[in-house]
Image (cartoon, helix red, strand yellow):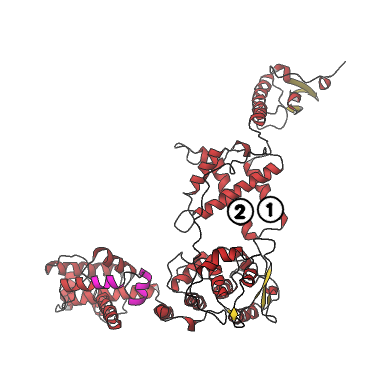
């Protein structure tokens, strides 16, 4: 007599024919016969319990749900090629672990890849299921084979709205990296048989984010020297204490970029043992191609910069560049922006790619033993195996170049056109306290001018400011100004201006020696002279604050503080003298 375990698998049909009852101790418990689904016998366990049910009605309901699930999985496997093991979130983790175990990728690259895949998982498991009533749903499992080309296209469009952490959204190059990271996951899934061949929806996407062709931007010798000088003095002299402090080794870090032409990850991964002062060379471990490992010359200026740095480290191993907390340097764009702004560049204009372009450009213009530098040697220094990339991308910018006897970017190479920015670099730091003190001094000067001829008692009666406070404020420009007192001073100035018939209620004054027409003409000339300058450059050159400059440029206002007027007149007079 055969037992239930030896019976032939029953065909799919009614639920009763699939329920098997097994006696465990003195209790009969329900199991589902799923042998025709290649799953054997499965215990029918209710939610919240650990053993199969003993209730026939509950067993029927559990079996019905289980049959629906396995039938749908079979249909998906046949029609879509779905594999239960190809869950997007789980397989992305396996993919990253395999990349890390290979040892072929840097930590920085792996972190970037992890961020890209985290966004992809978030989009396909949550964002695509969001509705007006439920804008932030719980994550739902998503099979790799269930993601279509339309889904990937929607993901690419969604990436255009993702913030980049710097006040904008992801650019085309960053979005393209995200798409490539997802495509890499599919390539691994296909190679492991979890997704059918040819079912990579990323590869089938036609409208991938396109990157504009590089214009090979590069910096002149004087501009690179200005950046290095800004990095040298910025560590001990940050202009704005409220901003993120620079890296303690920003000068040495930046100099290595500029004077080696290495890629960003290559500079990060330089170790102390890779710097050889005896042979004036640096070993670079390539991060892009197999043959990009190389030894590059350590130019005299870089030796002068790195020698004290290595001596200060006091160790013969470990990374050459670390943060203040002792970790590898990650995203340092905010620090680079801080250095660039101090050197007179617009925020966000300077990125590490431009240093590589500049190095190759100026290296090709160097003189080597009386002859021009060999392009092949330059190609090997920057990790290229042949001249194709050098001649196609970099050689075309070699125009109006200066032949360099030595690969160096020193302060004495800064020409007349950049002397103003160099002078601004050496000016004493203008802190927030100094700006606030200047503003208070202007308000007090206007207050005493408006109240000229009135006794202390009369001013106190009209303004509501006590006589002792008035005497203290008259004691000197550095007197403390309480916010409530400042409000009363402004109200007093407005009241006196109204009494005098002034059109404006702003606490500003017009020079008695100049009428409005002359002031308007002066401001128009000032706007014209500073038209090609950024607000930061104008502030450094004239002392006029950014908000004031924006108001002048936007409204052509005639009323300005006396101190601001004096700065504008001095700048215009100096400009006329130069002409």
Can residue 244 be seen by looking at this rendering? no
Give the residue at the far front of this rendering. Answer: 371
Q: What stretch is highlighted in magenta?
A: 524-544
Q: Do the residues labelled 2 and 1 touch (CB within 8 Å)?
A: yes
Q: Dot 2 surroundings within 10 Å: few (below 14), some, or many (20 or more)? A: some
Taking the magenta stretch, the answer to whether it contains residue 456 is no
Q: Is mark 2 on a helix, strand or loop?
A: helix
Q: Distance between the residues labelled 2 and 1?
A: 10 Å
Q: Which element type, helix, strand or loop, lies under badge 1?
A: helix
Q: Relative to 324, say whether 54 is above or below.
A: above
Q: Residue at x 71, y 17 (%)?
A: 16
Does residue 426 sit above or below 488 in this rendering?
Answer: below
Q: Where is residue 76 in the image (x, y as percent from the top left)?
A: 64, 30
Q: Mark 1 points at which residue?
A: 99
Q: Residue 211: x percent and y percent?
A: 51, 54
* Near-viewer residue (234 or 153): 153
Residue situated in front as seen by the camera: 118 or 82? 82
Nearest to N terminus: mark 2 or mark 1? 1
For disc 2, the marked residue is 113
């Amino acid at each position: 007599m055969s037992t239930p375990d030896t019976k032939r698998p029953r065909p799919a049909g009614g639920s009763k024919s699939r329920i098997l009852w097994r006696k465990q101790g003195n209790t009969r418990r329900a199991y589902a016969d799923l042998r025709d689904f290649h799953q054997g016998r499965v215990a029918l366990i209710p939610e919240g319990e650990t053993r199969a049910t003993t209730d026939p009605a509950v067993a029927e309901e559990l079996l019905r749900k289980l049959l629906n699930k396995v039938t749908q999985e079979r249909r998906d496997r046949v029609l879509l090629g779905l594999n239960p093991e190809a869950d997007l979130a789980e397989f992305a983790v396996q993919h990253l672990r395999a990349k890390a175990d290979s040892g072929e990728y840097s930590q920085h690259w792996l972190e970037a890849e992890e961020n890209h895949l985290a966004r992809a998982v978030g989009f396909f498991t949550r964002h695509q299921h969001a509705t007006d009533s439920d804008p932030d749903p719980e994550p739902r499992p998503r099979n790799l084979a269930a993601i279509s080309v339309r889904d990937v296209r929607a993901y690419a469009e969604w990436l255009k709205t993702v913030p980049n952490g710097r006040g904008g959204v992801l650019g085309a190059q960053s979005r393209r990296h995200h798409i490539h990271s997802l495509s890499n996951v599919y390539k691994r899934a296909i190679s492991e048989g979890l997704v059918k061949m040819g079912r990579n929806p990323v590869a089938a996407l036609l409208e991938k984010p396109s990157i504009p062709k590089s214009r090979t931007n590069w910096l002149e010798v004087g501009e690179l020297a200005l950046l290095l000088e800004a990095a040298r003095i910025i560590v001990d002299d940050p202009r704005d204490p409220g901003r993120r402090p620079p890296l303690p080794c920003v000068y040495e870090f930046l100099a290595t970029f500029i004077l080696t032409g290495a890629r960003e990850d290559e500079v990060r991964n330089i170790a102390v043992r890779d710097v050889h002062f005896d042979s004036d060379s640096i070993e670079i471990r390539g991060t892009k191609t197999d043959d990009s490992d190389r030894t590059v010359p350590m130019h005299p200026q870089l030796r002068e910069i790195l020698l004290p740095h290595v001596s200060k480290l006091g160790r013969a191993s470990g990374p050459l560049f670390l943060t203040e907390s002792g970790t590898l340097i990650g995203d340092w764009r905010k620090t680079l922006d801080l250095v660039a702004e101090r050197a007179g560049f617009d925020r966000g204009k300077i990125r590490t790619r431009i240093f590589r372009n500049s190095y190759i450009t100026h290296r090709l213009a160097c003189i080597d033993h009386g002859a021009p530098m060999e392009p092949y040697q330059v190609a090997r220094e920057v990790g290229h195996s042949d001249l194709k990339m050098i001649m196609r991308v970099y050689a075309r910018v070699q125009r109006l170049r200066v032949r360099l006897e030595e690969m160096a970017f020193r302060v004495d190479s800064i020409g007349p056109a950049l002397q103003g920015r160099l002078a601004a670099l050496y000016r004493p730091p203008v802190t927030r306290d100094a700006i606030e003190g200047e503003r208070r001094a202007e308000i007090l000067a206007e207050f005493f001018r408006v109240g000229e001829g009135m006794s202390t008692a009369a001013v106190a009666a009209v303004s509501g400011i006590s006589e002792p406070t008035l005497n203290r404020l008259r004691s000197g420009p550095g007197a403390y100004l309480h916010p409530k007192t400042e409000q009363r001073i402004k109200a007093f100035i407005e009241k006196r201006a109204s009494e005098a018939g002034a059109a404006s209620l702003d606490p500003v004054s017009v020079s008695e020696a100049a009428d409005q027409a002359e002031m308007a003409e002066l401001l128009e000339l000032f706007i014209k002279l500073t038209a090609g300058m950024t607000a930061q450059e104008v502030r450094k050159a004239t002392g006029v604050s950014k908000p004031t400059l924006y108001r002048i440029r936007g409204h052509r206002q005639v009323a300005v503080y006396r101190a601001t007027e004096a700065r504008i007149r001095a700048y215009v007079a100096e400009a006329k003298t130069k002409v």
